[in-house]
């Protein structure tokens, strides 16, 4: 097993996230097998691999949906120091560690307005400010201040993703591409240090895909967070990733820059298989495609 490309050294700052020897078993099925890699902030780290390779399972371990069978997930939080995610409950991972995620299948609250979806994401802050309800009911000044800050933050992110005009519309009324953007805005409302995006380009048309790429690059440049991207659209992966980690059958088979991954024979073999058919050729073409 190769070691992470971004290795921790005596002089270098530790990575934002260190995944070390992560394994996840479901009965006899080994979904992730002794995987290690690092994620740094102000960078986009893509996880790619064929269907069933274990990509989403990594997110589920990082965000507390699953407890890893083995392994250490160390988040070096800029304000809170070292946090071991594998020991934390899911709600604390979002609330205290600042790890936010979006889902392969969009999970907005459909009957709530778009703005309400973004405010609900900040309920931890609001609950605290309301002193767990009384302060909210009586509208203490501290609560009103927190409520205004939550609305301002939601409006900021609605603007960033181009949904200001849709703020008062039920989330179910958004187009598919708008829902994907609203999910990212909602995740950013928890002010994460690590943003995990599960197939954000799935189902988007080429224009929306282009807008998504611009949005992710802008978030990377303007906010001090790390982004992990699971994505099948190779034009997105190759176009915006700083580092790519490749999975196959639960194992990490390669790690490198887009240029390195594009010409890695192990990666090409994993996508092509032994006998390459027409569909496989399309995948190979995608790996080799230049960013649009
Ligand atoms: N809760 C679970 N119980 C049993 N098996 C599971 C569970 N979650 C995932 N798996 C299995 O683990 C393996 C990896 O699944 P995972 O969803 O992580 O793959 P993936 O790389 O994200 O695939 P895709 O690209 O299709 O989303 C698959 O064989 C899947 O069936």
Image (cartoon, rainbow, N blue to C red):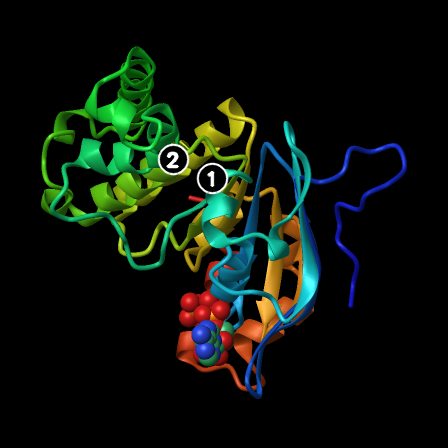
Classify mark 2 as within 8 Å of ligand 1 or not, answering yes or no: no
Q: Is residue 33 above or below residue 259?
A: below
Q: State the image coordinates of residue 123 (x, y, percent, origin top left).
A: 33, 35
The one of 37 and 214 positioned closer to us in this rendering: 37
Q: State the image coordinates of residue 119 (x, y, percent, origin top left).
A: 27, 32
Q: State the image coordinates of residue 254 (x, y, percent, origin top left).
A: 68, 63
Classify mark 1 as within 8 Å of ligand 1 or not, answering yes or no: no
Q: Is residue 225 above or below residue 32?
A: above
Residue drawn where x is 47% and y is 43% of the image? 94
Tag 1 residue:
95
Identify the disc placed on residue 124: 2
Kindly indicate whether the residue at mark 2 contacts the one at mark 1 (C-beta within 8 angstroms).
yes
The one of 125 and 30 positioned closer to us in this rendering: 125
The one of 239 and 292 positioned closer to us in this rendering: 239
Check disc 1: other Cα within 10 Å, few if <14, some if 14-19, many if 20+. some
Quadrant containing the N terminus in the rendered view: bottom right
Q: Earlier in the sequence, mark 1 or mark 2?
A: 1
């Amino acid at each position: 097993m190769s070691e992470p490309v971004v290795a921790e050294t005596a002089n270098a700052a530790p990575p934002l996230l260190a995944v070390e020897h992560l394994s996840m078993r479901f009965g006899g099925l080994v979904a992730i097998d002794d995987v290690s890699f690092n994620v740094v902030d102000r960078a986009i780290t893509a996880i790619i691999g064929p269907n069933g390779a274990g990509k989403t399972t990594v997110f589920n371990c990082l965000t507390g949906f699953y407890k890893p069978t083995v392994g250490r997930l160390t988040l070096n939080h800029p304000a809170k120091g070292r946090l071991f995610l594998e020991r934390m409950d899911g709600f604390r991972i979002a609330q205290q560690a600042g790890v936010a995620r979006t889902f392969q299948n969009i999970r907005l609250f459909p009957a709530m307005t778009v703005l309400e979806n973004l405010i609900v994401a900040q309920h931890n802050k609001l609950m605290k400010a309301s002193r767990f309800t009384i302060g909210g009911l009586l509208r203490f000044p501290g609560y009103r201040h927190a409520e205004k800050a939550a609305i301002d933050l939601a409006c900021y992110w609605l603007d960033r993703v181009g949904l200001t005009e849709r703020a008062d519309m039920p989330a179910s009324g958004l187009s598919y591409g708008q829902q994907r953007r609203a999910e990212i805005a909602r995740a950013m409302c928890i002010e994460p240090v690590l943003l995990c995006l599960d197939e954000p380009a799935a189902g988007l048309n080429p224009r929306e895909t282009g807008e998504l790429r611009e949005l992710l690059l802008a978030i990377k440049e303007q906010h001090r967070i790390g982004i992990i991207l699971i994505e099948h659209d190779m034009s997105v992966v190759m176009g915006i990733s700083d580092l790519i980690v490749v999975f196959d059958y639960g194992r990490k088979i390669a790690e490198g820059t887009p240029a390195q991954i594009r010409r890695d024979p192990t990666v090409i073999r994993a996508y092509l298989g032994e006998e390459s058919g027409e569909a496989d050729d399309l995948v190979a073409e995608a790996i080799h495609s230049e960013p649009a």
